[in-house]
Every structure is written in structure tokens, then in C-alpha cells.
Image (cartoon, helix red, strand yellow):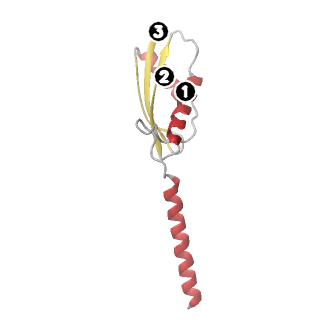
Amino acid sequence: MWLSLTLAILSLLVVLNVALAKSRAYSAPPCRAGTQDVPACAAYIAYLSQALRSQTPQATNLGEGVAHVEFKILASGAFAFVRYSGSSPAHAEMALRILKSSRLRPPPGPYALAGQTFQFH
């Protein structure tokens, strides 16, 4: 009887530890506008901006223009949602290519919502 009770208590403790570990996995809030005061989110948003700038070509043959992308990055680092626009379809497509060519690390929370504006010269 004591062995059964001990095993039942151990099993319960394992289940509780697993549940606690899962709750800690996403204890950080999603990173998006308004969470800049969360240090992990502020650092991640700065990382995103730098990572996208590093993928932006120095010069294009598109001429002057602007493009903007908005996106959601899942915990896996994959994009789940992308919206893009630009001063011309070519500028918008260039911004999308920049985004797709970037390999981003996962956000600190369950996901991140972000946007980036590109100026082309």
C-alpha cells in the first residue's frame, strides 16, 4: 500500500512539474508595440530591426521609394503573418524578399508582432 501511495504521489509531482515547466516556457508576454518596457522584448525588437537592415541591399535599380512590412514571428522563428505595401509594387516586393531572406531567432515570448519600414534610394 505504501508503495502504491508513494508511486501515486511521485506521478502527481511529475505531472505538476511538467505543467509548471510549460507555464514558464511562455512566461514572457508577446512582443509587440507597447511592450518596449519589457527588457526581453525591447532587445528582441532591436535585434529584428538590425537583422532586417543587414539584409537590405545598399542600392537597387528601383529608384526612390518606401516599403513597409508587418509580420508575426512564432516561437519557432517562422513567419505566420505578413502584410506588405510600398510606394510601388516593386518596392513592396523588395521588402517582402528582404523579410523572406532573413533567418530570425525565436522571440522571447510565444510570438512577436513587428513592422519595418524600408527607404530605397
Residue beneath label 2, please? 95
Name the residue: 53% across, 24% down: 98
- What amino acid does circle 3 point to? Glu
Mark 3 or mark 2, which has the lower sequence index?
3
Q: Which residue lies furthest to the bottom in this view?
A: 1
Tally of numbered discs: 3
Which of the 4 image quarters holds residue 80? top left
In the foreground, 20 or 96: 20
Q: Which mark is residue 64?
A: 3
- What amino acid does circle 1 point to? Leu
Give the image location of residue 33, x and y in percent: 41, 35
Q: In this view, does 65 lie to the left or right of 59?
A: left
Say above or below: 119 vs 71: above
Q: Is residue 54 left or right of residue 96?
A: right
- What amino acid does circle 2 point to? Ala
Give the image location of residue 92, x and y in percent: 44, 20
Spatial CA distance of label 2 from label 1 is 9 Å
Mark 2 or mark 1, which has the lower sequence index?
1
Residue beneath label 1, please? 52
Q: For numbered disc 1, what is the local secondary structure? A: helix
Q: For numbered disc 3, what is the local secondary structure? A: loop
Q: Tags 2 and 1 in contact by the CB under 8 Å rule?
A: no
